[in-house]
Image (spheres, coloured by chain):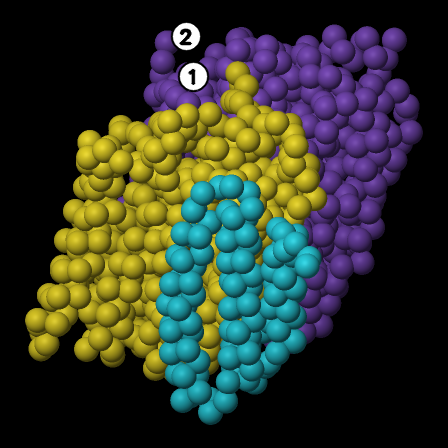
Chain colours: A cyan, B purple, C yellow
Amino acid sequence: MIHVGLTHFLVVSAILFSLGIYAIVTRKNAIMVLMGVELILNSANINFVAFSKFGNLGLGGQLIALFIIILAAAEAAVALAIVLNIYKTFTNVNIDEIDNLKE
Amino acid sequence: MEQNHLLTYLLLTPIAGSLLILFLKEENPKLIRWLGFLISIAAFIISLFVYFGFDASAADFQFQDKILWIKSLNVSYFVGVDGISLLLILLTTFLTPLTLLSSWKAIEKKVKMFTFMMLFLETGMIGVFMSLDMFLFYIFWEAMLIPMYFIIGIWGGEQRIYASVKFFIYTMFGSLLMLVAIIWLAVYASGPLGSFTTNLLDLYKVGPSVPREIQSWMFFAFLLSFAIKVPIFPLHTWLPDAHVQAPTAGSVILAGVLLKMGTYGILRFCLPLFPQSAVYYAPFISMLAIVGIIYGALVAMVQPDMKKLVAYSSVAHLGFVVLGIFAMTEEAVQGAVIQMINHGLSTGALFLLVGVIYERTHSREIAYYGGIAKLIPVYCAVLMITSLSSIGLPGLNGFIGEFLILLGSFKSSVLNSWWFTVFAASGVIFAAVYLLWMYQRVVFGTVKNPELQNKLTDMTARELIVIVPILIFIVWIGIYPSTFLDMTRLSTEKILRSVGSFTLSLVK
Amino acid sequence: MELSNLSHSLNLLLPELTLSIALLVLVLFDLIFHHDKKIISYVALIGLLATGFFVINQFSLSGFAFSTGNESYRNFGMITIDSFGSFFKLIVIVASVIIVFFSLSSDEIKKTSERIGEYYALIFGMILGMLFMISATDLILIYLSVELLSLSSYVLAGFTKLRERNSEASLKYMIYGSVSSGLMLFGISLVYGMTGTTNLYMINSLIQIPHLNLFTFSFAMILIFAGIGYKISSAPFHFWTPDVYEGAPITITAFLSVASKAAGFALLIRFVKITFVSYIDTSGFWQLIHVFDWKTLIVVISIFTMTLGNFSALWQDNLKRMLAYSSIAHAGYIMLGLAVLSNQGLTAMLIYFAVYLLMNLGAFLVVMLIANKINSEEIDDYDGLGYSSPFLAASLAIFLISLTGLPPTAGFIGKLYLFVALVDANMIGLAVVALLNTVVSLYYYVRVLKHMYLTKPETAIPEIKTSKPNTILVLVLLIPIFIFGIYFTPLVDLAKGCITILGL
């Protein structure tokens, strides 16, 4: 058995973070971009929990993770409402095509 | 020295007047014009009081008035005059009513705003000449930009917008550099003086002790700002545009006073604050001045437009002033001061005269005219005197200034070469060529253009009232310059003394 | 936690508590008064004034709220109340009060008056977020307050839904915002991992001993800066600014440009000061701990920000968009004050902010009053405005001149103190860069003046009449610009008294 240590968690979180960034940069669909953001938030969550577990930092990290989960839910609610509104106006949610404001 | 509020009254008169005018109704331009004129006359009268109260036998700044303004920066409202600034203030208060009077017909739209802007501008100009605090100086210096921008931009010619924006950006660039240099100097002064200060008299003591390298930077930051205003070649390109596009009144004020602020700044700040750098770079700057003299004259020669010709002649004339200042001998600097006044009078008058015929025919093309001597003899006589004064004919004012500058630059130990004098003198000859040639083409010959017969009428009484006072001074300075030279002698000596010790140490 | 500690903490949080109560009252009133929603605006105003009262009351107060309870670090709390924070809170509250008045006369907001309750509730959410941002000294609280501010403002940016551009602004703001706050959170998690705490004071004492992986730490700092940089719209996190400023309702644009930016700056300053300064030397310079070179980062970013803002503004034809770029540029100027890393630089920033509040809100107010009438913010439509509506045009001209920084307006004073601070720290090159930028900015500000006064309109435009309250509001912003331009000692004294950041 491999002993699962801090490094493993950090690697997972780093992969999640990178995937999140990748999604944000490449995806054109607003929903997909938001999912990328969720990935980043969750990678941070993993960090917090892992650090607090392995660094003997008490329950602070877990507590923070709870905060973030709630906040992510709130953010998702607001974000989806806005995307819905966009869909009503533009009949698509493709970020590249929503470009009426001039550069 | 006892406190005297006369200068403050002088400063407040035009600004209070301009605010008063804001409350008048636009529908009554006559009232606005008269009121504006009377306010500027009042300012002139107050400046005469200053003149008669002025003690020419004292070199100090007189009529000092000082109120602590901003405690945290140790900035005060601090004004005072010496001979040089008094002379320039008189020039300002003298020219402003004349320009207002001259534009009674030329400015028909938005008279209220025009009068407001002119009086506002006058406050700024007077303020620049009397400030003894760098911060105060800077505020007045910048405060003039906005009215001038509007005067060119609203009442100017076809290219007015381009010209006004160019003027604004050029001047602003220079003055911001100066701001940094002022702050730098003030911060530096907080070492030896113990506190941040912008008091000019205190900074005079500190400036010369700034290390050479830093001093050069500060010197050039100041110089650049002033050089743009003067303008010294090659920073002059805004000037022809601004002059040509500005309305007559704007051109007169621009040539008469605003350009002097540049040379005044050099004399008041660059020389006494940074004497080592000033002496060190004097030959270089004088060279630029010479280039300006010759370049201005040559370009003026080929101009088809009368106003443009006068504008380029300004570049040449101001070259003389800069040469005089950087020759750093008593004759030369005195000559430079007198030349500043001369240029204000002669070039101002030339712009007025171009404006007079432009109002009638709406053309400034030299080729358009010809043979107007028979049509409007009085005008031609006045134009003759003014042109000759600008050329520097003995007996008229221009001669005194140019002669003193040439003499002084010849003797100058800072320049230490008579080539400067030779090239500058050639500029005098060029001036004769382009002005007389212009005069000949416009005035003599046969009337080529039949339109002129109907359009041209001789000068009206109002126009003569504007021009005659200037002519009086043109002759006065030419015949009896001592009135003015005596005023500035001690002030000049004082500036040169502050440079002097360094001059000697460097040259020998 | 003992009860006395709790009551002590709550006492320090009086402004925030007042605001929260006002927020609840707003929601309740919105439910109770279906028909006449006018009262809501007054409730909002009263709530703000009460909050403002408590903020002013707190000026002399200082202390830590919600200490972590750990014996050794007993004194350090999650929230720090000090004069620095109170100053910024006051800026936010004043801006908010003005925004309420804006909203009362904005056509865009009037058209959605049946939802005015939500509108103010969301604005109050923003303000609450800002107040916490200003005084938070714990990374998690910082993150939460940033999110509180962001979530409310995402919605507000698209609140009116009158035009397509509203929704678009909202979407863009939300996407950029959530990404940058996600990055910030990840950075915070790394810091937590490396130091074991999220409290700034404890981080400060821990990083004094250099045992960190500097690379990871710098990476975390840059991520955190991304979150803050987004709020203050500094390059390269500014991309949302022009689109959102142009698309959002103008009241919200004005609010974002002043209050949100003020809160972001307060956060940045406090973060840098508390976390990274080891001591302040006798002449007021902050000595950094050598773990991360904030000075270079801020210098580079500020030069980049102001240059980009100014040059982009040159090409803009929409006034709101131009003001957006100009506000980016101003963020760059203000950052210069931080780059100095001294008490003097901090004073300059505070002065600049007070001045910026007046002139930027003023410019937006006039643009809004004009847009109410001509329904356009294009600069070309401003032709001849100087003569058809002299009062508005003259006010706009003065606000813009002040934004340029010409005397005798207050904008000059802001720049003056910045320059003094820069020169005093011997950063003359930076001062020169700033002034070159000012010259560039002159061009686009003057362009508006040109259109208002020098260009002849193609079609005659009607006079824009301003109602009495609006005239008064413009004057309220306009007169201080002159007063502070000529007599600024009180402002400077106030700023000098407000540079205490508890810490060290």
Q: Where's the N terminus of chain B, which quadrant?
A: top left
Q: Residues within 10 Å of mark 1 (few under 14, many from 20)?
A: many
CA gap, disc 1 to disc 2? 8 Å
Q: Amino acid at mark 2?
A: Met
Residue B99 in the figure: left or right of residue B495: left
| Number of numbered discs on residues | 2
Corner quadrant of residue C11:
top left
Give above or below for B388 relative to C181. above
Residue C59 vs residue B400, the one in the foreground: C59
Q: What residue did someone put label 2 on?
A: B1
Which chain is mark 1 on? B
Residue C200 in the figure: left or right of residue B37: right
Residue B469 vs residue B106, the one in the foreground: B106
Residue at (42%, 17%) from the top-left corner? Answer: B63
Please state the horizontal and vertical placement of residue C432, each as a whole percent of the image.
65, 40
Residue at (52%, 32%) from the top-left corner? Answer: C204
Q: Amino acid at mark 1?
A: Gln
Is disc 1 placed on a helix, strand or loop? strand
Residue at (47%, 92%) from the top-left corner? Answer: A91
Q: Earlier in the sequence, mark 1 or mark 2?
A: 2
Please state the horizontal and vertical placement of residue C201, each as a whole percent of the image.
46, 33
Q: What residue did someone put label 1 on?
A: B64
Q: Residues within 10 Å of mark 2 (few under 14, many from 20)?
A: few
Which chain is mark 2 on? B
Can residue B180 be seen at all in this image of the molecule? yes
Is disc 2 placed on a helix, strand or loop? loop
Please state the horizontal and vertical placement of residue B508, each as a whole percent of the image.
88, 8
Pointers 1 and 2 in contact (C-beta within 8 Å): yes
